[in-house]
Amino acid sequence: MASLFGLVMFFLSCAIFQAFPVSSFTSNGLFPELYQISCPQANEIVMSVLEEAIAKDPRMAASLLRLHFHDCFVQGCDASILLDKSSAFKSEKDSGPNKNSLRGFEVIDEIKAKLEQVCPHTVSCADILALAARDSVVLSGGPYWEVPLGRRDSKTANFKKANVNIPPPNSTIQNLITLFDKQDLNVEDLVALSGGHTIGMARCVSFRQRLYNQNGDNLPDATLEKTYYNGLKSICPTSGGDNNISPLDVASPVRFDNTYFKLLLWGKGLLNSDEVLLTGNVKTTKELVKSYAENDALFFQQFAKSMVKMGNINPLTELKGEIRKNCRRVN
C-alpha cells in the first residue's frame, strides 16, 4: 500500500512539474501558469472585458497600463492603488500624481466581478492589474509577454510614497534614473518603459511649464519643435484648462509602436520627462532612444522584458496580503 502511494505521488509530482516547468518560476515564486487549474478562464475573462472597454474608449489601454505602473512604484505590485480611502489610511488615488488623473478603476471592477462569479476568491487584484496592462498593450498593437502570477493584495495603501516615488512629468534625467534605480530598474528599463507613452494622453498641467516658463525665465523649452509648440499652446493656455489633454504620441496616440522615440528625435516629446531621455546629457539614454526609434522589434523586446521586471517589484506572496473580494477595499 505504501509503495503504491509513493508511486502515485511520484507520477503526480511529474505531472505538476510538466504543468509548471521550473523555468517559468521567478525568484519570488510568481509563475505564469498559476491559474491554469484554479481558474482556467482567467485570461479569457480579462481579455474579453478589455476588448469591449478599449473598443468604446481606445485611450483606456494607456490608462490601464499606467495603473499598473503607478501601483508597482508604491510599495510594490500589490494593488494598493485600487484601495479607496478608509478610516485606516489615505488613498493613493488622492496623491498628487494620481488625483484627477488616473482612470480605469471601473474596468478593473468589472474584470474582478466576472472573475469572482466564475472563480471566487482566486485571482488577486494585483494580478488583474498586471494582466490588464499586458493585454492593453497587445490590443493596441504592442508585444505579448507571459505575465508571472501569484501576487496577493495589500491591506493598506501608502499616500506618502505615492507622492514621492512616482516620477513627475517635469523630472530631470537624474531624477528619473534615481527613482527607477530605487525600484531596481536600470537605464534600459527607464527608456523602454517610457516608451509606454506611445499610447495615451497627458493633461495641460503636466506640460504647461515647458510652454511658458521652462527654466524660471518666462521662456518656452528651446528643445520643442516650433509647429508642435504652437499647437500645444492652443490646447494649453498660460492659466486655466488644466485638464485639457494632448496625446503623448501626436502621430499615433492609440497605436503601440516606436513612433514615440522618433518624435523625441524631432523635438516633439510632450513631457519634460520624455524629452530629457534625449537631451539630458546621459549618453546611454540618448543612444537607446535612437536605437528604439530605428528598430521597433528591439523596443518591443526590451519593453516586454522591462514590464516583467517591473511587475516583479516587491510582490506580496504566500501568506502575506490577501485576495480581495472587492478591489476597492480590504476584506
Image: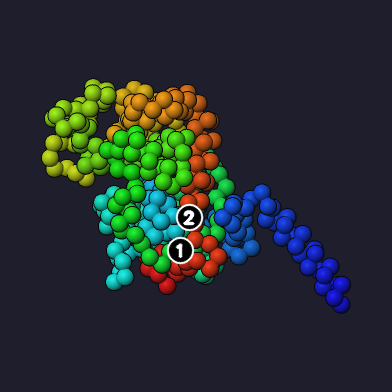
Residue at x-position 31% and y-position 27%: 268
Which residue of the protein is positioned furthest toward the bottom in this rendering? 1
Q: Is residue 186 above or below residue 164?
A: above
Residue ID at (37%, 43%):
179
Q: How many marks?
A: 2
Left or right, 193 with reference to 279: right
Of residues 330 and 143, which is closer to you in this image?
Answer: 330
**Mark 2 lies on residue:** 314
> As displayed, is residue 328 above or below residue 270?
below
At label 2, which amino acid type do we have?
Answer: Asn
Earlier residue among tags 1 and 2: 1
Which numbered disc covers residue 70?
none
Relative to 105, 47 lies left or right: right
Q: Position of residue 70 (x, y in %)?
A: 38, 50
Q: Are marks 1 and 2 in contact (CB under 8 Å)?
A: no
Residue nearer the viewer, 96 or 19: 96
Residue 173 rendering spot, x and y as whole percentages: 34, 34
Residue depth check, mark 1 versus mark 2: number of the one nearer the observer: 2
Mark 1 lies on a secondary structure that is: loop
Name the residue: 41% across, 56% down.
75
Residue 153, numbered circle: 1
Quarter of the figure that contains the C terminus? bottom left
Residue at 47 percent across and 25 percent down: it is 291
Task: Identify which amino acid the numbered label 1 is placed on.
Answer: Asp
State whether residue 208 is above or below residue 126: above
Q: Quadrant of residue 251?
A: top left
